Amino acid sequence: MSELRAKDYVRPGRRGYTTRLWVTDPDGGRRQVRVTAPTWREFRTELNRVRRDNDLGLLADPQRLTVSGLSGRWLTTMGSRIRPRTHERYAQLLRDHVIPRIGGVRLAKLRPAHVQVVIDGMAGEGMAARSIVQAYRVLSELLKQGVKWQVLAVNPAAAVSPPRPGRPVLTIPDAATVGRVLVAAEGGVFHAPLVLAASTGMRRGEVLGLAWRDVDLEGGLVRVNATLQRIAGELALVDPKTDRSRRTVMLPPFAVAILKEHRAEQAERRLLAGPGWTDRGLVFDRGDGRPLDPGHFSHVFHSLAIATGCPEVRLHDLRHAFATTLLASGRVHPKVVSEALGHASVGFTMDVYASVLPSMQQAAAEAMQEALGGVVTNL
């Protein structure tokens, strides 16, 4: 919509103030929208509302608006409401899987069969069930918003059932495997970050986004207040994944010792760098104060895993190893483990890891035997 100068185009009359604005529909057609209000203040309010609705695409003719047009407006709206990385993922799923298949379909003609086309097309390309479900959920949210904006009567995705993804198979390295990787990393830039990841269960971005102001080496703890991510090609510090992800994690003594050594070594490098040092306050840096790249972190870990004879282990699997080590010990309450991981609930934690902890099942059986075994056998 072109800029409107009220003093030139607004006409006062017996019914108040009025003007007309040009609206461009998705197919390129243009039409006029009339704005009228009895007082100047109400007119300005109504004019701003019309302009805002037009920017969101709410004034477009629903008979002409397409799935592609709705998705563009929805993504613009969601830009300030969700995490940047999540926004990128939504845009990718729509761009790669939805728009090529049904982007040109007008909302007035959109049916559940079109949503099924997206699901079947992704399945035919061999996409994982989890990716198909993600695309379905994003498309469903898009169409749900279309209903709220009153450009759709119903959400066609509600009548379609996506595939059910199977439970992912976790790769959980044992303590010996983790130890070999840490030893292989000694002397390198990523040794200290790996020690922190292995000893706290922190996510990759949380480790690399950690700032010294959130580290208390005397108290033996770190506070997770940010995560480092690559967004639109640039590294940026963003809020943690969820409110639960913002947490305090205790450090074991060996991790405290490694971080103290790292802090001293970093101070020496900072002194030598002088004006060349970029002060971001980060615990881990690439040598000049700037952040380490998360993708490079994963790549280095993969090389170390191959060198130590465990190529199937990923960097994220250190998080699984941390969780299962604590749970299997029987000395740490599952709620404490859940809070350390930053999970939404202890139920989620147990749902993820209980199936890979046969020792916990065995402990439950032994507890019941001790409690009731003698009574039952004497009946």
Image (tube, rainbow, N blue to C red):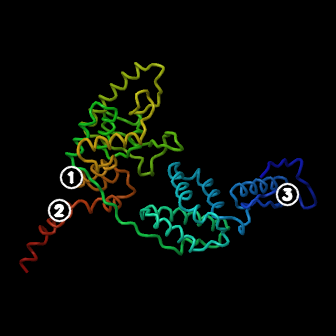
Q: Kindly identify which residue carries mark 3.
A: 20
Q: Residue furthest bottom?
A: 379
Q: Which of these two is toward me, 197 or 159?
A: 159
Estimate the x, y position of residue 221 in percent, counting from the top left: 33, 39
* Local SS, label 1: loop
Where is the C terminus found, in terms of image quarters? bottom left
Q: Position of residue 281 (x, y in %)?
A: 44, 31
The residue at the point 10 percent across, 72 percent down is 373
Dividing the picture into quadrants, the one containing residue 57 is bottom right
Residue at mark 2: 363
Q: Look at the numbered discs 2 and 3 and tell me whether their residues touch, using CB distance below 8 Å.
A: no
State which mark lies toward you, 2 or 1.
2
Task: Using the image, tell me which numbered label, if any, was put on residue 348.
Answer: none
**Label 3 CA crowd tier, 10 Å (few <14, some 14–19, many 20+):** some
At mark 2, the secondary structure is: helix
Residue 331 image label: 1
Vertical relation: 248 (above or below) 370: above
Labels 1 and 3: the sequence-earlier one? 3
Give the residue displayed 24% in from the left and 44% down from the top: 178
Q: Is residue 267 above or below residue 190?
A: above
In the rendered view, tell whether residue 87 sits above or below residue 166: above
Q: What's the residue at 21%, 61% (across, down)?
A: 360
Going 34% across and 44% down the picture, which residue do you hit?
A: 249
Q: Residues within 10 Å of mark 2 (few under 14, many from 20)?
A: few
Q: Nearer the viewer, residue 76 or 185?
A: 185
Sooner in the amino-acid sequence: mark 2 or mark 3: 3
> In the image, which is nearer the foreground, mark 2 or mark 3?
3
Q: How many discs mark residues in the rendered view?
A: 3
Identify residue type, mark 3: Arg
Position in image of residue 333 (x %, y %): 26, 55
Q: Earlier in the sequence, mark 2 or mark 1?
A: 1
Please report contact status of discs 1 and 3: CB closer than 8 Å, yes or no. no
